[in-house]
Image (cartoon, grey):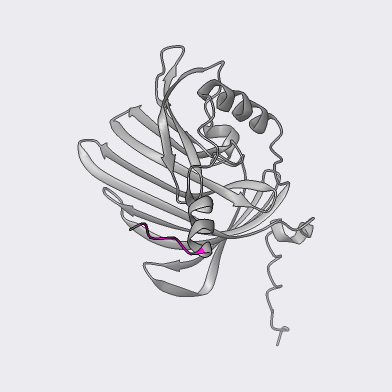
Amino acid sequence: MNARLPAAGLVLLVLLGAGPGPLDSQDVLQRYALALAGLPVPKTVVFSYTVSQVGPSSIEQSHRVYRSGNAVRDETLAVDGVLLHGKVVTFSRHEDRYTVARFAPRSDAYELLFLGTTNDGRHLDYVYEATPVAHAAGSFVDRLTVDGITFLPRAVRFRTSGLGVDGTGEVRFAPFGKYWMPVSATAQARVKDKPAHERIVWSDYRFPESLPPSTFQSPKPLPVATLPPV
C-alpha cells in the first residue's frame, strides 16, 4: 500500500530537497575575487568586543570602540568580570587589524585548492586549502571558507610562528548591513614553550555617518583651584 504525502509534506520536500547543486570551484573563486574587489569598508564604526587570554598573561576584558578612519577611541568597561565605575579610555591611531582585506587570501599570493563544501544549515559554503605562492615567514593563511551566498570569506584559518611563538587561529566574519565584519577570533599558541589561548568576540555594530571630533580628543583637565594669599 502506497502512503500519500499531504500537500504540506510535498512542499517541505521541495523546499528541503536538492536545490541548485554546488557551483564549480573555479566559478566560486571568480565570484570571491569580484566580491572582495567590490566590498565596501565603513569609514565610521562603533562596536563592542570582549577579549579573553589565558597563558603567560591572563586577562578578561570588555570594551567599546569608536573608530573613524584610523582614529580610535577604546573604552575599557569591565575587567575580570567586574564593571569599572570609571571607564578607562585610550586614544590611538592605527589601521584596523581584523578587516576582511587583511585576512582574505588572494590569488596573487596564494594557491587555493578546493576541498569540498560544508552546509551551514541554510546554504552551501566552499572550503579551500590555501598555500602561499612564496615562502611565508611569520603568519600565513592555510584554510579559507567562502560564503555560498555573498562569496566573501566566512572563515579564515591561519598559522603563525617566530620569536618563540608557534600557533594557529581562525577569524570568522558575518554580514552587518552592507558590511562584512569580524564576529570572532580564536588562537592557540605556545609562547616560549608555554600554552596560551585567546578569544575575541565582536558585537553591537553601528555605522554612524560621522562622529564628533571630541570623540577622539582627551578631555581638558579642570583648572587647579588655588587659594588666595592670606
* Front-lying residue, 4 or 185: 4
Q: Is residue 146 above or below residue 230?
A: above
The span shown in magenta is 2-6
- Tell me the residue at 42%/39% (across/down): 118
The image position of residue 72, as x and y in percent, is 64, 51
* Front-lying residue, 72 or 111: 111
Q: Is residue 86 above or below residue 121?
A: below
The image position of residue 130, as x and y in percent, is 43, 23
* Front-lying residue, 219 or 37: 37
The image position of residue 104, as x and y in percent, is 54, 31
| Most frequent secondary structure within the magenta stretch | loop
Residue sitting at the far bottom: 230
Q: Is residue 195 magenta?
A: no
- Tell me the residue at 72%/83% (across/down): 229
Where on the picture, by quarter, is residue 117? Answer: top left
Side of 60 where 65 appears, left or right: right
- Tell me the residue at 48%/47% (across/down): 17
Q: Is residue 4 magenta?
A: yes
